[in-house]
Image (cartoon, rainbow, N blue to C red):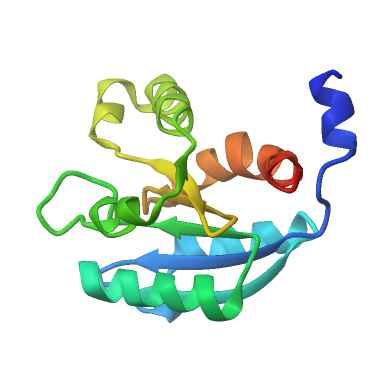
Amino acid sequence: MSTEEHRKKAVQHIRIAVISISTTRKLADDKSGAWIKKQAQKEGHEVVIHQVVKDDITDIRNLLTHVVEKITPHAVIMTGGTGISPKDVTIEAVHPFFEKTLSAFGPVFAQLSFEEIDAAAIGSRATAGIIKNILVFCIPGSLKACKLACNALIFPEIGHLLKHMRE
């Protein structure tokens, strides 16, 4: 079966959680998270939570655990905390929970980023995986990076990935 035939059978209505990780932003000035929420709704999906959490391993893990266990979305899009500074701990907080990783996500995102920002793309640690049958994407916090990840990778493929997870 071709990829197009698979996509015709993809999950259409998706429950999405948006989590922004930041030591400085609050919900009112969370441009990236707000854009993801608006774009997800534009795509016909339901945003079940949009929250900002401090860039702290324990805080991130506590919120992610709450979202996965109590809210149970189909997917979580986490933005921020994926860089290389000491305060960027999203990957360290989330990666141990992955039951499976989408190992191509990071390299494909890096390639797309490279096409836009050249060698600076190597500073991103974007990743994705599955936790308790929920897709989790960890993407950079910049609005430009969020748009790239969501428009080029996440939204075009999320329903198809969910379809395969349910097989």
Residue 154 in which image quadrant? top right
Q: Residue at x 54, y 45 (%)?
A: 147
- Across and down, in percent, residue 160 comes to 74, 39
Outermost residue toward the left in this view = 86
- Where the C terminus falls, by quadrant? top right
The spot of residue 121 in percent (x, y) is: 31, 29
Which residue is at 48% across, 33% downward? 105
| Residue at image location 31% in from the left, 70% down from the top | 60
Seen in the picture, residue 32 relative to 83 is either above or below; the reply is below
- Label tally: 0
Considering depth in this image, is 93 or 132 the residue closer to the camera? 132
Q: Is residue 60 left or right of residue 28?
A: left
Left or right: where 6 falls relative to 47: right
Q: In which quadrant of the rendered view does residue 109 lie?
A: top left
Name the residue: 83% across, 52% down.
Answer: 12
Residue 161 location (% of width, % of height):
68, 41
Report whether residue 29 is seen: no
Q: Is any part of residue 76 visible from this angle?
A: yes
User: In this view of the protein, which residue sits in the foreground, 129 or 122?
Assistant: 129
Image quarter (top left, top right, bottom left or bottom right) of the N terminus? top right
